[in-house]
Image: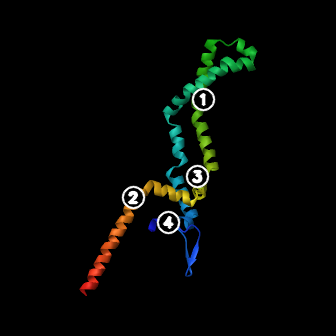
Amino acid sequence: MAIWLLFHPRQPKTILGWKIQGIWPARREQIALQAGNYAATAFPLDDLEQRINEPGRFEEIKPLIEEHMDHFLRHKLKEQMPMIAMFIGDKTIQSLKTIFIQEIESLFPQVISRFSGNLKKELKLTELVSAKLAAIPTHTIEQAVRRELGTELKLVALFGGFIGLIIGVLQLLIVLLL
Protein backbone atom coordinates (compact mmCIF):
# COMPACT_ATOMS: atom_id res chain seq x y z
CA MET A 1 0.00 0.00 0.00
CA ALA A 2 2.83 2.39 0.86
CA ILE A 3 4.47 1.81 -2.52
CA TRP A 4 1.16 2.32 -4.29
CA LEU A 5 0.70 5.62 -2.43
CA LEU A 6 4.01 6.88 -3.82
CA PHE A 7 2.42 7.10 -7.28
CA HIS A 8 -1.38 7.02 -6.76
CA PRO A 9 -3.68 8.77 -7.09
CA ARG A 10 -2.00 10.57 -9.95
CA GLN A 11 -4.49 13.43 -9.94
CA PRO A 12 -5.48 15.13 -6.65
CA LYS A 13 -8.66 13.75 -5.13
CA THR A 14 -10.63 15.22 -2.25
CA ILE A 15 -11.99 12.71 0.23
CA LEU A 16 -13.89 14.05 3.26
CA GLY A 17 -12.22 17.44 2.83
CA TRP A 18 -8.71 15.97 2.59
CA LYS A 19 -6.72 16.43 -0.57
CA ILE A 20 -5.00 13.15 -1.47
CA GLN A 21 -2.41 12.65 -4.19
CA GLY A 22 0.55 10.33 -4.67
CA ILE A 23 3.88 11.62 -3.37
CA TRP A 24 5.62 11.56 -6.76
CA PRO A 25 2.86 13.34 -8.74
CA ALA A 26 2.36 15.94 -6.00
CA ARG A 27 6.04 16.74 -5.50
CA ARG A 28 7.50 15.90 -8.91
CA GLU A 29 8.83 19.44 -9.50
CA GLN A 30 10.50 19.59 -6.07
CA ILE A 31 12.03 16.14 -6.42
CA ALA A 32 13.25 16.96 -9.96
CA LEU A 33 14.83 20.22 -8.74
CA GLN A 34 16.58 18.43 -5.88
CA ALA A 35 17.85 15.77 -8.29
CA GLY A 36 19.09 18.51 -10.63
CA ASN A 37 20.90 20.25 -7.77
CA TYR A 38 22.44 16.94 -6.74
CA ALA A 39 23.57 16.19 -10.30
CA ALA A 40 25.15 19.63 -10.63
CA THR A 41 27.09 19.26 -7.37
CA ALA A 42 27.90 15.56 -7.69
CA PHE A 43 29.08 15.80 -11.29
CA PRO A 44 30.68 19.22 -11.71
CA LEU A 45 31.93 20.14 -15.17
CA ASP A 46 35.29 21.11 -13.61
CA ASP A 47 35.97 17.41 -13.11
CA LEU A 48 35.23 16.76 -16.76
CA GLU A 49 37.60 19.55 -17.79
CA GLN A 50 40.36 18.15 -15.57
CA ARG A 51 39.90 14.64 -16.97
CA ILE A 52 40.02 15.90 -20.54
CA ASN A 53 43.17 17.93 -19.80
CA GLU A 54 45.03 14.99 -18.23
CA PRO A 55 48.45 14.54 -19.89
CA GLY A 56 47.62 11.26 -21.65
CA ARG A 57 44.36 12.49 -23.19
CA PHE A 58 46.01 14.43 -25.99
CA GLU A 59 48.08 11.36 -26.86
CA GLU A 60 44.81 9.46 -27.40
CA ILE A 61 43.59 11.90 -30.05
CA LYS A 62 46.99 12.69 -31.53
CA PRO A 63 46.83 9.92 -34.21
CA LEU A 64 43.49 11.26 -35.40
CA ILE A 65 44.88 14.80 -35.65
CA GLU A 66 47.99 13.54 -37.46
CA GLU A 67 45.87 11.58 -39.90
CA HIS A 68 43.66 14.59 -40.59
CA MET A 69 46.68 16.88 -40.91
CA ASP A 70 48.35 14.46 -43.33
CA HIS A 71 45.20 14.27 -45.47
CA PHE A 72 44.95 18.07 -45.46
CA LEU A 73 48.58 18.65 -46.45
CA ARG A 74 48.65 15.94 -49.12
CA HIS A 75 45.19 16.34 -50.70
CA LYS A 76 43.16 19.37 -49.66
CA LEU A 77 46.09 21.79 -49.86
CA LYS A 78 46.74 20.64 -53.45
CA GLU A 79 43.09 21.31 -54.31
CA GLN A 80 42.97 24.72 -52.61
CA MET A 81 46.46 26.03 -53.39
CA PRO A 82 48.02 24.05 -56.25
CA MET A 83 51.04 26.37 -56.56
CA ILE A 84 52.15 25.88 -52.95
CA ALA A 85 51.50 22.15 -53.12
CA MET A 86 54.02 21.83 -55.96
CA PHE A 87 56.85 22.91 -53.63
CA ILE A 88 55.88 20.68 -50.70
CA GLY A 89 57.38 17.20 -50.55
CA ASP A 90 57.15 14.39 -48.02
CA LYS A 91 59.91 15.83 -45.85
CA THR A 92 58.21 19.25 -45.69
CA ILE A 93 54.84 17.66 -44.97
CA GLN A 94 56.36 15.70 -42.11
CA SER A 95 58.00 18.86 -40.71
CA LEU A 96 54.77 20.84 -41.00
CA LYS A 97 52.80 18.05 -39.29
CA THR A 98 55.29 17.99 -36.41
CA ILE A 99 55.13 21.77 -35.96
CA PHE A 100 51.33 21.84 -36.21
CA ILE A 101 50.94 18.96 -33.74
CA GLN A 102 53.22 20.71 -31.23
CA GLU A 103 51.21 23.90 -31.59
CA ILE A 104 47.89 22.07 -31.23
CA GLU A 105 49.22 20.22 -28.18
CA SER A 106 50.09 23.50 -26.45
CA LEU A 107 46.76 25.02 -27.51
CA PHE A 108 44.63 22.02 -26.48
CA PRO A 109 44.30 22.84 -22.72
CA GLN A 110 43.34 26.45 -23.50
CA VAL A 111 40.70 25.38 -26.02
CA ILE A 112 39.22 22.83 -23.61
CA SER A 113 39.22 25.36 -20.77
CA ARG A 114 37.41 27.96 -22.85
CA PHE A 115 35.02 25.37 -24.25
CA SER A 116 34.15 24.01 -20.81
CA GLY A 117 33.75 27.56 -19.46
CA ASN A 118 31.24 28.33 -22.19
CA LEU A 119 29.58 24.97 -21.64
CA LYS A 120 29.19 25.70 -17.90
CA LYS A 121 27.49 29.00 -18.70
CA GLU A 122 25.20 27.56 -21.34
CA LEU A 123 24.44 24.08 -20.02
CA LYS A 124 22.92 24.83 -16.60
CA LEU A 125 23.02 21.21 -15.49
CA THR A 126 20.56 21.75 -12.61
CA GLU A 127 17.87 23.07 -14.94
CA LEU A 128 18.56 20.45 -17.60
CA VAL A 129 18.29 17.48 -15.23
CA SER A 130 15.29 18.98 -13.44
CA ALA A 131 13.39 19.57 -16.67
CA LYS A 132 14.17 16.11 -18.04
CA LEU A 133 13.18 14.36 -14.81
CA ALA A 134 9.99 16.41 -14.38
CA ALA A 135 8.98 15.54 -17.96
CA ILE A 136 9.04 11.78 -17.32
CA PRO A 137 5.45 10.56 -16.94
CA THR A 138 4.48 9.23 -13.52
CA HIS A 139 3.51 5.81 -14.86
CA THR A 140 6.97 5.46 -16.47
CA ILE A 141 8.69 6.17 -13.14
CA GLU A 142 6.36 3.74 -11.39
CA GLN A 143 7.06 1.00 -13.94
CA ALA A 144 10.81 1.54 -13.62
CA VAL A 145 10.65 1.36 -9.81
CA ARG A 146 8.54 -1.79 -9.91
CA ARG A 147 10.77 -3.38 -12.56
CA GLU A 148 14.03 -2.59 -10.73
CA LEU A 149 12.81 -3.12 -7.17
CA GLY A 150 10.01 -5.65 -7.72
CA THR A 151 11.45 -8.41 -5.54
CA GLU A 152 12.51 -6.04 -2.78
CA LEU A 153 9.08 -4.36 -2.78
CA LYS A 154 7.37 -7.73 -2.40
CA LEU A 155 9.67 -8.57 0.52
CA VAL A 156 8.88 -5.23 2.17
CA ALA A 157 5.15 -5.86 1.72
CA LEU A 158 5.47 -9.37 3.18
CA PHE A 159 7.53 -8.08 6.09
CA GLY A 160 4.94 -5.36 6.78
CA GLY A 161 2.18 -7.95 6.67
CA PHE A 162 4.11 -10.23 9.02
CA ILE A 163 4.67 -7.42 11.53
CA GLY A 164 0.97 -6.50 11.27
CA LEU A 165 0.06 -10.14 11.99
CA ILE A 166 2.33 -10.28 15.05
CA ILE A 167 0.88 -7.01 16.41
CA GLY A 168 -2.65 -8.28 15.80
CA VAL A 169 -1.94 -11.56 17.57
CA LEU A 170 -0.37 -9.69 20.52
CA GLN A 171 -3.41 -7.40 20.74
CA LEU A 172 -5.72 -10.41 20.66
CA LEU A 173 -3.76 -12.10 23.45
CA ILE A 174 -3.88 -8.91 25.55
CA VAL A 175 -7.67 -8.61 25.04
CA LEU A 176 -8.24 -12.30 25.87
CA LEU A 177 -6.02 -12.17 28.98
CA LEU A 178 -7.72 -9.05 30.32
> To which quarter of the image does residue 82 belong?
top right
Q: Secondary structure at mark 4?
A: helix
Q: Secondary structure at mark 3?
A: helix
Q: Earlier in the sequence, mark 1 or mark 2?
A: 1
- Of the residues tagged 3 and 1, which is closer to the observer? 3
> Crowding near pointer 1: few (<14 within 10 Å), some, many (20+)?
some
Cα–Cα span, label 4 and label 2: 15 Å
Q: Earlier in the sequence, mark 3 or mark 4?
A: 4
Residue drawn at 50 percent across, 36 percent down: 54
Residue type at mark 3 is: Leu
Residue type at mark 4 is: Leu
> Cβ–Cβ below 8 Å for labels 1 and 2?
no
Q: Earlier in the sequence, mark 3 or mark 2?
A: 3
Cα–Cα span, label 3 and label 4: 27 Å
- Of the residues tagged 3 and 4, which is closer to the observer? 4
In the rendered image, the quadrant that contains the C terminus is bottom left
Q: Secondary structure at mark 1?
A: helix
Q: Earlier in the sequence, mark 3 or mark 1?
A: 1
Tell me the number on the disc at residue 152.
Answer: 2
Cα–Cα span, label 3 and label 2: 32 Å
Where is mark 4, residue-wise?
Answer: 6
Q: Residue 60: image x %, image y %? A: 52, 30
Task: Using residue 51 as the reference point, say whether residue 87 is left or right of it.
Answer: right
Cα–Cα span, label 1 and label 4: 54 Å
In the rendered image, the quadrant that contains the N terminus is bottom left
Where is mark 1, residue-wise?
Answer: 104
Where is mark 3, residue-wise?
Answer: 125
Residue type at mark 1 is: Ile
> Crowding near pointer 3: few (<14 within 10 Å), some, many (20+)?
many
Cα–Cα span, label 3 and label 1: 29 Å
Residue type at mark 2 is: Glu
> In front here: 164 or 36?
164
